[in-house]
Each structure stands twice: as C-alpha cells, then as structure tokens.
Image: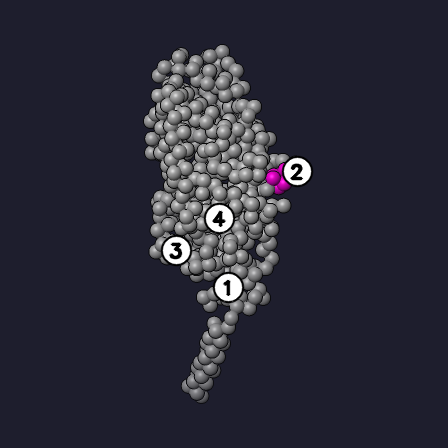
Amino acid sequence: MKIQGTKGLLLALVTVLMVSLLSACGGKDASPKGNNGTNSSNNGEAATTKDEITELSLFIDASWYPVNEWKGPIAEKITEKTGVKLKVTVAADDKQLPLMISSGDLPDLIFTSSQVTRLSDSKLSYPWNELIEQYAPNFIIDDTRKAIHTMEDGNFYTVRNSFATQEEMAEHKYAIGSDGNPGIAVREDILAELGNPSLNSVEDFVNVLGMVKEKYPDMVPLTMDKDWMEQYFIQQFGVEALLDGWYERDGKIDYAIKQPEILEFFKFMNLLYRNGYILAENFAYTNDQIDDEYAVGGKAFAHSHTVSVADSDNAKIKNNGADYSFKMLPSALSKDAKIVSSGLGFAGTFITKNNKNPEASIKFIEFLASDEGKKLTMFGIEGEHWTWNEEGYPNLNYDPSDADFVNGNGIKWWYLYNDGVTEGLQGYVPGTQKTQALLERKAITVYKPEIGLIQTEPDSEERTIKTKIDEMIKNEKVKIYLASSEEEAIANYESMLKTAEQIGLQKLVDWANETYQKKKDLFK
C-alpha cells in the first residue's frame, strides 16, 4: 500500500509539472498584451516585477564623467523604484562611441550629447514613441520636446535633459541654471592689497590684471580652464553664439565667426596675451587640472572656469590650510553682455536595438521623467538630502559644490532624463557665489531654442562642410589669440573667414537658413 501510494503521488506530480510547462510554453508564444500586468518584452521575456532586478548595460559617452558605477543611495533608490540596475561603462575618449556604432556593438542604453542625431535612427535605436504607446501609455511628453526631437521619419528616439523653455524658466524664479555656465573668480586678498580697484567693466578687469602683473610679476594674472577659455568673454562682447554655432539677426541665420561683434572679442583675447596677462601655453593644456593647480596653489590671480569656480576653489584652498579666497566677477561685466540660449538640452538616453528588455528600459526612463524621479536624481532622497521650501526650491542638506559628497552619493549624474527647471533648482543655494552668478546670468538670458534645431545630418554634405570649418577654426583661432600685434590678429581673423568661405561656408549658411525657416514655426 505504501509503495502504491507513493507511485500515485509521483504520477500526480509529474502530471501537474507537465501541465505547467505546457502553459509556460504557450505564454512565451503569445504576443505582448498591452499594459494589463502580463506584458512581454520584444524578446519574449516576461515583464519585470517589483521583486525582480533587470540589469541593463549603459554606455556614457563622456570621458570626463565623474561617476562610473551604479552605486550609492540614489542608484539604489532608483533600482528599488524601477527594478532596473545599470552596468555602467564610461567612454575612454570621444572616438569610442562612433566606432561602436559602426561595428554594431552597442549596449542596452546609450547616454550621449555628441551622437544624438546619429543614434536617432530606427536601425540603431527603438523609437520612444512606439515603446511609450506599447508599454507606457501614461508617460506624457510635452509637444515642445516632441517637436524638438522628432526626426524626418516621424519618430523621436530620445529627449535631452537640461532643457527648459523661456516660459518654464520664467514660471520658476528659483530655477537658475546649472554649473555648466561660465564664470571668472579673482583673489580677494590681492584686490584689497591693490586698494580694491573697481571691477565693473571689461576695461576695469584689464586694468586690474595690469596692476597684478606689475606688483606680482611671478603670478599669472589669469589662468583658464582648457574647456572654458572663451565663453565668459564672448558673452561680454554681446556675441550670441560660440565659435562653432549659429546666430540670428533680423530673421536671418549666419555663422558665429561672421557676427560683427566677434572681431572685438578676438582683439580683446589677443590683448590679454600681448600684455602678458595669459600664458601661451594655456592654449595647449592637455588636461583640466593645470589651471586649478595655478589657482588653488596661489600662483594665479584670476581663474576662468564655471559659475562655481569661486566656491570650489575656496573649498580646496580651505582643505589645503591656506587663508586666501576667491570671489566671482559679475556675470554681466559689460553693458553689452548678452546670453542667447539656443540649446535643446545636454544629452539624451537611447534604447538601442541590442536592448534585451525595451519594456523595462522605457519604464525606467518614465520613472526618471516623473516629478519624483527628477527630484530624486537631482536633489537626492527627500527627508535625508533635502526638504522642500514653501518658497518653491529645495533646502539642500549638503553643499552642491562639494564634488566628493555629490559624486559619492550619486546625486545629479543619473539624470538620464531630467529638465532645465529641476536642474536649475538644484543650483539655487541662498548665500553662495554660484547662486548669485546664476541669478545675474538669468537676468540677461534670452531663449531661442529654434536656432538649436539647425543640426546637420550624419554623413551629409552639410555635416562634412561644418566639420571642416569647425576644425579649421579650432586651429586658426589660436593664431589670432597669439598674434604679435593687433594688426596681425585682424589679418589672421580675415584669413580665417576667407578659408571658411573656400571650404563652403556660404553653402552651409544657405542650408541653415532654409532649415531655420522650416523649423522655427514649431515654437509658435
């Protein structure tokens, strides 16, 4: 009896197991069923539940990126909320991603600013709009952002972070921007020793540099971060775009190097060099630490970098036990100062065709795009890292200029989807020099994102022309800066313009105007 009973039990168990396996096989053959909790991803895998962890590979196309591992309280909280964990790789250089695209060796997700147009291709990436329709119908993206990112095929493949319209920024007075804005700081103690001379104009600044050079001949009057040499001064002269960008005048588009005000900027930079206020070697720095060493080590009077340069330099100086400090120059050091924001955001996240779980990926981005997700990413964990001020900004329980704390906790840098308002709020810390500089910048900023829509297509003739012109400008501008006389600087500038025309600048400008006329109405 005992043996017979055991056999019967085993037979029953085998029968149940076979039925279960047959049911599972039937489920795998079924197509995705919308959003009823039984979705399947495109490769047939079951949707992630809150008790499962989906690991996705992420490539960050920025060799300077300060975080390279999915760890810390912010990453852990995002995983808790989404069920997604990232295996992160940071680019070794700016050539790595183009090579990966060419070879087809792509990860699940790519975060990039330089290859947005290239990756916005159905052969390489999933269209967000299709994934949203299939897996995340409650993920709402506003019409402006859709218009900005929609390609010729009618799809959009990403939405860049850090973007906000002029209306959005106006609605949030404490959204003041981010560290990605230029600024210059100067030594307070040396100013005092010089009798606290006026610093209310570009001419004043040049005069003070001259005083520094005369009284402190062993000190570099101005040291510049290799990536932030031009931005602050270009804006003081009213130039509306960087040297590789477009500007609009009376409804017409032209290239920045043709803007009338640009020559005054070039002459100014040449003056700084000829007077010995900047070093020729500054234009050949191979890393972004050399200028910091000059400033923090007491070997430079002024330091050109971003709006946080005074706060960050002072923190390092204090840690080194020194007793001097830096203060920011006004963001508008000239009556002509002008800032035109034509940016469409910084970088976007792409869900590649190699992605093993598109459903989990778009839902992951949907969470990051939510109010909760944006604040978690940018501010930290509510109640631990910040509380909300009734005035409309976060009271941070840390110094956002403290890179060790911010990076160590994973704050900000997982902004794979965010916006300019939330990022701008993170920059508002009452009483800091960075906040004051950003408030000053906001007061003179005009937003023209329609100009940002002038983007050359990969492998197009326009892209080839623009690439050649930009590379030429990169080389020739240094000859203008380091000219032995103003006359030579002007001649070098005119030679640069002539070379650009020979490369095909007018053809590029004609194309840009045609593109601008087509796309500017998206913002009406």
Mark 3 vs mark 2, foreground winner is 3
Give the x, y percent position of residue 146.
56, 51
Q: Amino acid at mark 3?
A: Leu
Residue type at numbered disc 4:
Gly
Q: Does any portion of residue 248 appear in the rendered image?
A: yes
Mark 4–mark 3 contact, CB under 8 Å?
no
Q: Earlier in the sequence, mark 4 or mark 3?
A: 3
Cα distance, mark 1 to mark 2? 39 Å
Q: What mark, if any, has residue 348 been given in the picture?
A: 4
Earlier in the chain: of badge 4 and badge 1, it is 1
Q: Earlier in the sequence, mark 3 or mark 2?
A: 3
> What residue is disc 3 on?
106
Q: Tell me if 524 is positioned left or right of 364 in this view.
A: right
Q: Which residue is mark 1?
A: 47
* Magenta stretch, residue numbers: 166-170
Q: Nearer the viewer, residue 70 or 266?
A: 266
Query: From mark 4 to mark 1, how far is it between C-alphas?
Result: 24 Å
Callout 3–callout 1 Cβ contact below 8 Å:
no
Cα separation, mark 4 vs mark 2, equals 31 Å
Q: CA distance from mark 4 to mark 3?
A: 16 Å
The quadrant of the image that shows the C terminus is top right
